[in-house]
Structure formats: C-alpha cells, structure tokens
Amino acid sequence: MKIAVVCANGKAGKRIVKEAVGRGLDVTAVVREENHSAAPKVIQKDLFDLTSHDLTGFDVVIDAFGAWTDETLPLHSTSLGHLCDVLSGTDTRLLVVGGAGSLYVNPEHTVQVADGPDFPDIFKPLAAAMAKALEELRKRRDVKWTYISPAGDFQAEGERTGQYILGGEELTLNDRGESVISYADYAIAMVDEAVDGGHIQQRISVVQK
C-alpha cells in the first residue's frame, strides 16, 4: 500500500508516518521544507502547489494540515478543498486529521462540543474553522474521504497504549468517562483506517480505551 502524508513534519504527521513506516507500508512525506519525518520518500512541495500528477499512484493520501493563528485559520477549508480537487474522481482515499469541537453531544446532532459552556474561548475560532471545513467536505461526492476526529483531550506527548475505541459523529467516552487520546494512539487508528477501514464519505472518531 502506497501512502502519502501531507504536512508530514507536523506533530500528528510525524506520528502517522512513524506508525505507517513501522508497519512496512510504502510511505511518502509531502513537506514544504526538509523532511523531518521517518518517511523514506519525499515530495518537497507546498500543499497548494500539489497536482493530480503528484498524487497519482497513491492508495491513500492523509491530510495532516493544521493552522492555528487567526489569519491562517481559513486555510483549513482552502487546503482541504484543494486536496479534494486534486483527488476528484480518483480511487485514492483521502483521510483527514480532524478536530473534536465539531463532534455532537446529543442524539439529534444539533449541539456540538464547541457549543458547550466549558469549551475554552481560545479554541473556539479553531473549532469553527475546522467545522466549516468538515461541512464543506461533506458536500464532496467526488472524493473517497474519511474525516477522523480525535477525542476532546488530544495529547501530543501522551503514551502509546495500542488500544482505542472507534466512535462516530458523537463524542464518545471510555469506561472511565474520559474523552482523551494520544497522538500515538490516534496514529494507530489513522493507519488502521488506511489499511482496513471502509468509512467512505463518513466522519468517525477515536478515544483511548
């Protein structure tokens, strides 16, 4: 299986590359600068400059893009839209590192995590930008996308337990009532979806077991 990880130098991207390489998959890092991931192959190119030719032949493209400042938050939508346009009409799957703020907290799917009184104000603009990108992604019927939301507490330095619970559109808690997952365990879930998953045009979510 041939996998391309876009923005492979980021915290999530590096862990996803490491997990995929560790399983013996054929992994290519897509990076703007020098490659700092474990990927043996590299496409050094800005995400917005990628063409269909660049991504031809990959079974899966994993989008690990992230933007955090107010002026760059709209890039969540435009970058994802560009990748969709590049992969439109192909059999290549697009797996997206998503956010938790857009997960629903009621069965009617009318209230999201980011709507809660305890959701930090500082993260609301990011959650809104990622939710907008997801809503636009849902309209794409020409791309085999899967959007994977982490748990509410997404820990960059958390341990790799090797176990997780797969959820859907709603915020899922583990047996301890927690919504937490490490980047390492999230990477396991991402690569599992790439290899064995079939959640085409669906949003799924993961939480530490």
Image (cartoon, rainbow, N blue to C red):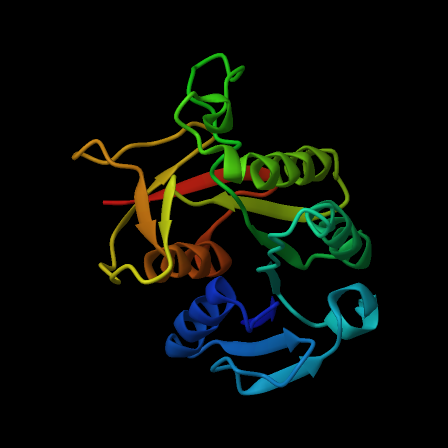
Q: Is residue 29 left or right of residue 177?
A: right
**Nearer to the camera, 118 or 17:** 118
How many marks overall? 0
**Nearer to the camera, 30 or 154:** 154
From where the camera sits, is residue 138 visible?
yes
**Nearer to the camera, 24 or 125:** 125
Residue 75's x, y, as percent?
A: 73, 51
**Nearer to the camera, 2 or 182:** 182
Residue 151, placed above or below residue 21: above
Quadrant occupied by the N terminus? bottom right
Residue 22, placed above or below residue 202: below
Rendered residue at 50%/24% (across/down): 112
Residue 131 falls in which quadrant of the image? top right
Residue 200's x, y, as percent?
A: 59, 43
Residue 71, placed above or below residue 176: below
Residue 88's x, y, as percent?
A: 79, 52
From where the camera sits, is residue 89 visible?
no
Residue that lies at the very extreme toward the left in this rendered image: 176
Q: Is residue 54 left or right of residue 97?
A: right
Residue that lies at the very extreme toward the top in this rendered image: 108
Q: Is residue 192 left or right of residue 174?
A: right
Residue 77, placed above or below residue 184: above
Rendered residue at 54%/15% (across/down): 110
Residue 175's x, y, as percent?
A: 17, 34
Quadrant occupied by the C terminus? top left
Rendered residue at 47%/62% (across/down): 12
